[in-house]
Amino acid sequence: MMQTPLILSSFIKRAERFFPEKMVISRTGEQTIQRFTYREWAKRTRKLSNALTQLGMEKGTRVGTFAWNHHRHLEAYFGVPCTGAILHMINIRLSPEHIVYVINHAEDEILLVDEDFLPHFEKMAPMLKSVKHIVVMSDSKDLPETSLENVHSYEALLEAASDEYDYPEDLDENTPAGLCYTSATTGNPKGVIYTHRGLVLHSYALGLADAMGLCERDIAMSVVPMFHANAWGLPFAGVFFGTTQVLPGPGFNPAVLLDLIEAEKVTITAGVPTIWLAALKELQQNPRDLSSLRVIVCGGSASPKGLIRAFEEKYNIPFIVGYGMTETSPLVSLSVLTSSMKDLTMDERIEIRALQGLVMPGLDIRVVNEEGEVPWDGKTMGELTVKGPWIASEYYKDERTEEAFKNGWLYTGDIAIMTEDGYLKLMDRTKDLIKSGGEWISSVDLENALMTHESVYEAAVVAVPHEKWMERPLACVVLNEGVTEDDSKKEELRDYLKGQFASWWVPDEVLFVKEIPKTSVGKFLKAALRVQLREQYSVN
Amino acid sequence: MMQTPLILSSFIKRAERFFPEKMVISRTGEQTIQRFTYREWAKRTRKLSNALTQLGMEKGTRVGTFAWNHHRHLEAYFGVPCTGAILHMINIRLSPEHIVYVINHAEDEILLVDEDFLPHFEKMAPMLKSVKHIVVMSDSKDLPETSLENVHSYEALLEAASDEYDYPEDLDENTPAGLCYTSATTGNPKGVIYTHRGLVLHSYALGLADAMGLCERDIAMSVVPMFHANAWGLPFAGVFFGTTQVLPGPGFNPAVLLDLIEAEKVTITAGVPTIWLAALKELQQNPRDLSSLRVIVCGGSASPKGLIRAFEEKYNIPFIVGYGMTETSPLVSLSVLTSSMKDLTMDERIEIRALQGLVMPGLDIRVVNEEGEVPWDGKTMGELTVKGPWIASEYYKDERTEEAFKNGWLYTGDIAIMTEDGYLKLMDRTKDLIKSGGEWISSVDLENALMTHESVYEAAVVAVPHEKWMERPLACVVLNEGVTEDDSKKEELRDYLKGQFASWWVPDEVLFVKEIPKTSVGKFLKAALRVQLREQYSVN
């Protein structure tokens, strides 16, 4: 067989050759939607490669992006790695200290930054050790006022650059293409390098009929930020398959997303549960025509069954839950239904949809405890481990590699069970598990159950210290608007759980809170919740 | 990223772990259908690996199969290459001389042979230089009477073997896995080596929503022989995705195939046009319920539009034409419809379906003439060249490599055009093109047009020498039963063509024949037709 490498530049060529008229639809401001054909986008991408090369980008150079989901970010997704350089997608929600850390740790030499974020960089600039150029990604060719040095206008650079660039066809497929940092429980973020090979194989997986079935006919909207785990790979795979891409840009809200779905006839979209919960609320107030949607993909944390039911039952849109993490490119599994499930009732179907699902073709998973792989019995918990060609093998220049990568497997730190059908169900993060009287209690199970109650908007369950049982669960609940926070409601919620769980699982106490702190990507941030609760409950 | 190799043993593990109850349905005789779960099939496959290892199979050993499509052949598809040995799928339709040639050239040490073919081997045995063992694949554990030495019963070997075998997980993905020989215009067949990497990537392509969308929910019947270009990859991809597989076994006919589709609720099937033409005829006489079929894939030679129309219009089954060859694993392109074609009329749709279609994600094609790539204008002809990770880079130990593999591209010997939409349309084999008065005439276009005429069952057009124009087309036509072969019919057919082609394309003469000679895989064998016509028309 030919030794044709699996590299991202082949995606640009395919989109440009075979789907030149398909569109990249980019919302760059509150009222601005820009449209580019793949022909135009490919030219702009090559112009970017030339412009950055002029600024000193070479093979291996790290180029950071600090940006929302828009066409320029998609140009950088290809214009940087196709030359052999490395795209570092910086998570804009990190703390300033961590942003400085990741830029210095990655040794970024060029940064591509959305105009909104420039004030940020002005403060951080003195701490950045490797950055030589800052390129401002705005619609205007004029540079904003700034105290920064070596600042360039993205559009001005592109205007001056040639649209011809011969991407190396013999680039080793194991060449690093991307770099993302993931938050650590303690300490600095940890970097994960993506290779061309890994991203190409991940893109194939997204196109499988057994996975998302992403294809040319799709109009795909990435709600997941492009600075977070490759926006779940949609931007890469979308170019590969000639999919129309809708990029929702800066400062979007549920109304904006729903308007885009309706106006652009989006067929597939992906985001975290909090996004879809908010979208559902908006939808109930201001209905839209969502009939173009063939699937919603949801991941990042557990999806409440009420959410799944609303979309599957009321809107007739398959709502597929997925599992992945920065270390896994990220797609590991999806709650697709197999042939044996075709006659399920709606209730049974939703039970399956709420699982993290079937592992993707090409990967393997094991849920393990001290004795090895746990039985597939739907109850024995263990730590999820993953292996495969789009799974990281290390943290970038980081001693913490050995904590997570052992014997050829990634230890995810997630506690899971396997159903008898081989479906993955996440129970908790290792650190979020509650160990009461020597037995494990899953905070996620309790949270999901609480969130199916009609009075509950959001809920998080954390461990609090207990003299006798070591730890006991505490439920922190945000009630729906208009619901009264009183003791009878607390008892009602506890009773509700008693109907579903062993009595010792039920939290001894329910605490009403105004909101659950969340991470930059909408996951419950239990560490922050614990900080808030520290004094009151001696939470660690 | 982890350096997890792309190897076939991962497919067995996936099918066995996640789809142990899915089925391999194997027709091994006229009235015999055997059913195995993937759990059973995987055990039998490992038993085969152990049994063959006992017979001396090592890494790199060539093991030949001489067999129909059945579960034992599928066991060999994995049981041989997963150990690091090489499966040589021998085309049973080759001439005895060529069979001896390919076995000796491949240096096969073990042969797995269907019982029906043993008499063949008794005659060839004295000429075979490398064969040490012959394993008879029959349902019985008793060996048939034979003059051959070192003959074993497949089932007896399996019975004695352990079902545990640790396939090497660190096998280099570029290790050869399979070997097929393809007929050459002149001389001996040419061998093509398939690697694990190539077959894994090809399997991903088959699963793409933009390709066949092969998936777990499918019930796939490979009509294409497993001794021909990997049965278009369905047996491999089927195991990967946990697809139910139906293998139609020896001596099937259209009635058997249609009965299997109806009884087993087949959802996808693949074969050459002659099979579907015959199936259509049978179907008209004895209707079946084909409502389970979601797609028919057709390739190997051009599909008459009348055939496509019948399935698309009357049976409402998408009929997708594909292109590939032994050298390309084989899938290169499929006539899938893109989003821009969703509002086509049935007539327009059939025009697209009859093309060879869009190139698969991961491959690239160029139609070239002396001046480089031809324009995509729907008329300029050139030779089709192909590149990609599941395209061969050479013929196995064969000097003819340099004729076909140049500058990193495979020169297919097929004359094609590209439509403005980037769809491939095959016009002819290089050697079948007719050059009349310095201009090219496509025999395939004329054949396809003739086959849409209500009186015509099959048609082949070949070049005959001509004093003035050098070559002129001659139409050889098989009429439908009951149609009278007379001069007025000849004129009618010529008039029919005149309405569709430039007058100089229309054959000067129409010849009625009883049948068109076909290759082992149902393609028109124009070389044989030319031999038949040689005396009468001085055909070369």
Image (cartoon, coloured by chain):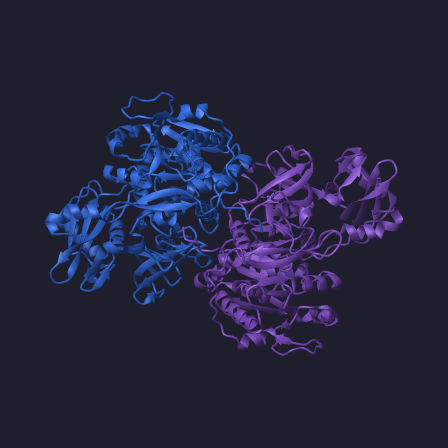
Chain colours: A purple, B blue
Q: Residue drawn 51% across and 56% down?
A: A173
Q: Is residue A112 above or below residue B323?
A: below
**Whether residue A390 is visible:** yes
Q: Quadrant of residue B379?
A: bottom left
**Whether residue B413 is visible:** no
Residue in front for this viewpoint, B453 or A342 = A342
Residue in front for this viewpoint, A482 or A161 = A161
Please count the marks in the image.
Answer: 0
Asked if residue B435 lies left or right of residue A6, the reply is: left
Q: Position of residue B142 (x, y in %)?
A: 36, 20
Q: Position of residue A440 (x, y in %)?
A: 76, 37
Q: Position of residue B32 (x, y in %)?
A: 38, 26
Q: Position of residue B306 (x, y in %)?
A: 31, 49
Residue in front for this viewpoint, B248 or B361 = B361
Asked if residue A87 lies left or right of residue B189, the reply is: right
Q: Quadrant of residue A355?
A: top right
Q: Residue drawn 80% across and 51% down?
A: A529
Residue in front for this viewpoint, B253 or A146 = A146
Q: Is residue B304 above or below residue A64?
A: above
